[in-house]
Image (cartoon, rainbow, N blue to C red):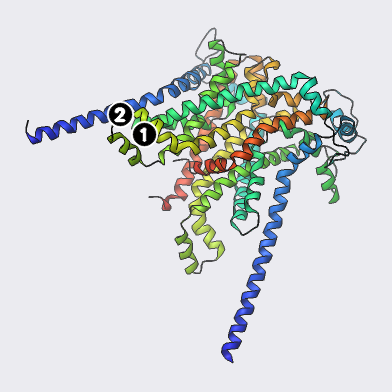
């Protein structure tokens, strides 16, 4: 065997062993793939199928009739608009307030690690454990009304009024701000120090430093926080359900309530169609945020 | 003379600047304290209220919970006294919950039975899968990983429908398996762990590979020890999330006897409020202990999540 042949031989050997290793890496994926396909992907295909037929017995293809029905369903409209209003209010607030908290943690305050623990602590508290105390606080004669009464406001039963949404936004922020704050703190810590020094040398004021340097570096984190907050804003059903049960005040009737009632009536078409509509909306929202981030944060990448 | 003046002026400016700085620090600290009080108050009050005797509780809040019962008489003439510290510290309600009325403990046990296997198995499956995703990349793998991200982002309103259908089809609807299996295969931990593992330099694993180590050896002896922190933090996040589950049992478990305490707690507040506070605190203990011991891991784990592209 000549030297060249030997080298070639080794090359193919190497290539084949790489191929083998790549195949083995797929083996590690198998358990997860199996479960994900069985419990999420395959049944999701069935969900798509169900959304296009008239009922599971006749299995007649009806096009977009189900979609039109769900779209025109008054309960769905109510639930969707309530959920949307809630997310539109709470997500921007979650982003700004947690950035504000992270900025506080950047200053020279004493007992910093304690404050971090305090801000993060609601993350571990199960909603069910604090529901009682929230009910006490937001009751007609509760703590919150006593405080607002000091400023001359009228007492209201928060959870049974048009202001019920505020209560839920407050609960949502209480639970999620700490988590977001940690994300922002990590992002702020990762900004290269020399960039900030250059900015200081150029006599940039704090406002300029924030918007021209820090915000650019934070943009991907801002998007991540916004997406995570959006996802958790869909989970707020927990708070609403545990505080007000199956039939809350009108403005608190959200998508999960609608879904629960539909499960109860076993209307597979409605259920599947609503799920697909939500799937499309969530994907579109995430995609939109991605696109915005790509435009804004482009110049720091690469 | 002039130089002296200059230095004096400079010192004065410096002192003034320092004073402004201290003032700023004080203001920021006050804001931080206000936030800290708001963040801690509900948990703190729940704990102090759990030590109030039932008579004290009903004297304080009786008027509230009389109204929350469906169709109950409205009786809200009394004002509510939100008490911070109980008059007499009482342990009777804890005694009742722990020894006299087993239904709360059964629900607590239910929660344990659901959450612990989900956390353990989800993490096991996820460490394997993350290694598979992180070790070599290809077009197909990237596409699959993207699908995992999309699945992770979907709210329960979407994912519970396929879960519901598959539980019915497999005949596990209404059993514990309908909660366990979708939880164990959840893509959440896979996503986060993959991001964690991708930060391990490939040279580390290649070096072991050149020395003749097989893939399993690299996974278990090289990769896993480097990921301990990440695995711990993700396990904590998964535990908090499932300990707080509400949506899944409501839809997949028609028998309320099988519900975890997170759902059951909301149903006991009308009758036995003082017990409810004690149960709420007992339910808080496991995540509280995990939080106290694992906060550093948790913070590190959240910090790693960073941007979504990873």
Q: Which residue is tagged 1?
A: B135
Rendered image quadrant of residue B247 = top right
Residue B110 seen in the figure: yes
Query: Are the residues at dot 2 and dot 1 in contact (C-beta closer than 8 Å)?
Result: yes
Residue A250 seen in the figure: no
Name the one closer to the observer, A51 or A302: A302
Determine which of the numbered discs, if any, sits on residue A179 in the image.
none
Q: Quadrant of the N terminus of chain A?
A: top left
Q: Which residue is tagged 2?
A: A21
> Could you classify mark 1 by the number of other residues whose Cα lies within 10 Å: few (under 14), some (14-19), or many (20 or more)?
many
Q: Residue at x 61, y 49 (%)?
A: A96
Rendered image quadrant of residue A107 = bottom right
> Could you classify mark 2 by the number of other residues whose Cα lies within 10 Å: few (under 14), some (14-19), or many (20 or more)?
some
Q: Residue at x 49, y 45 (%)?
A: A292
Judge left or right: residue B19 versus residue B177: right
Rendered image quadrant of residue A127 = top right
Pointer 2 chain: A
- Give how far across and how far down residue B258 sits, in percent: 67, 17
Q: Is residue A14 above or below residue A151?
A: above
Pointer 1 chain: B
Judge left or right: residue B110 versus residue A274: right
């Amino acid at each position: 065997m000549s030297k060249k042949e030997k080298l070639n031989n080794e090359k193919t050997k190497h290539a084949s062993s790489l191929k083998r290793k790549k195949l083995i890496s797929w083996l590690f994926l198998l358990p997860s793939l199996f479960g994900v396909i069985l419990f999420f992907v395959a049944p999701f295909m069935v969900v798509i199928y169900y959304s296009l037929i008239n009922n599971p017995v006749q299995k007649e293809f009806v096009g977009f009739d189900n979609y039109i029905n769900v779209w025109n369903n008054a309960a769905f409209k109510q639930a969707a608009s309530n959920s949307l209003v809630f997310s539109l209010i709470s997500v921007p607030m979650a982003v700004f307030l947690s950035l504000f908290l992270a900025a506080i943690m950047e200053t020279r305050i004493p007992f910093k690690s304690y404050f971090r623990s305090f801000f993060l602590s609601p993350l571990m508290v199960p909603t069910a454990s604090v529901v009682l105390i929230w009910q006490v606080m937001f009751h007609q004669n509760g703590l919150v009304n006593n405080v607002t009464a000091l400023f001359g406001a009228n007492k209201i039963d928060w959870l049974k009024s048009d202001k019920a949404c505020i209560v839920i936004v407050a609960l949502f922020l209480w639970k999620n701000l700490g988590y977001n704050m940690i994300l922002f703190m990590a992002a702020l810590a990762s900004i290269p120090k020399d960039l900030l020094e250059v900015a200081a040398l150029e006599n940039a004021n704090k406002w300029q430093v924030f918007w021209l340097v820090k915000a650019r570096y934070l943009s991907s984190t801002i998007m991540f926080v916004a997406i995570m907050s959006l996802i958790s804003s869909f989970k707020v059903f927990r708070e609403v359900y545990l505080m007000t049960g199956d039939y809350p005040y009108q403005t608190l009737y959200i998508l999960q309530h609608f879904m629960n009632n539909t499960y109860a009536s076993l209307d597979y078409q409605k259920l599947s169609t609503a799920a697909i509509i939500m799937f499309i909306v969530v994907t579109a929202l995430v995609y939109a945020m991605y696109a915005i981030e790509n435009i804004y944060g482009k110049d720091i990448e690469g | 003379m002039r130089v002296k003046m200059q230095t004096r002026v400079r010192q004065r400016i410096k002192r003034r600047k320092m004073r402004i700085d201290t003032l700023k620090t004080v203001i920021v600290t006050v804001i931080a304290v206000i936030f800290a009080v708001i963040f801690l108050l509900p948990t703190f009050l729940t704990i102090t209220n759990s030590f109030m005797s039932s008579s004290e509780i009903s004297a304080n809040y009786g008027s509230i919970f009389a109204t929350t019962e469906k169709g109950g008489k409205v009786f809200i003439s009394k004002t509510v006294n939100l008490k911070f510290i109980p008059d007499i510290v009482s342990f009777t309600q804890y005694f009742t919950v722990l020894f006299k009325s087993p239904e709360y403990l059964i629900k607590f046990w239910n929660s344990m039975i659901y959450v612990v296997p989900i956390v353990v198995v989800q993490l096991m499956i996820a460490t394997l899968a993350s290694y598979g995703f992180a070790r070599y990349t290809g077009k197909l793998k990237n596409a699959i990983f993207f699908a995992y991200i999309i699945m992770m982002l979907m709210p329960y309103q979407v994912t519970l429908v396929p879960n519901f259908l598959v539980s019915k089809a497999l005949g596990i609807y209404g059993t514990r398996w309908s909660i366990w299996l979708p939880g164990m295969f959840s893509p959440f931990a896979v996503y986060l762990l993959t991001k964690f593992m991708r930060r391990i330099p490939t040279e580390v694993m290649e070096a072991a590979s050149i020395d003749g180590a097989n893939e399993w050896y690299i996974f278990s002896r090289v990769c896993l020890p480097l990921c301990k922190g990440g695995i711990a933090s993700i396990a904590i996040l998964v535990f908090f999330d499932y300990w707080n589950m509400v949506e899944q049992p409501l839809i997949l478990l028609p028998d309320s006897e099988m519900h975890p305490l997170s759902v059951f707690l909301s149903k006991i507040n009308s009758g036995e409020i003082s017990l409810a506070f004690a149960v709420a605190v007992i339910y808080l203990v496991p995540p509280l202990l995990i939080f106290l011991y694992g906060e550093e891991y948790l913070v590190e784990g959240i910090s790693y999540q960073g941007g979504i592209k990873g």
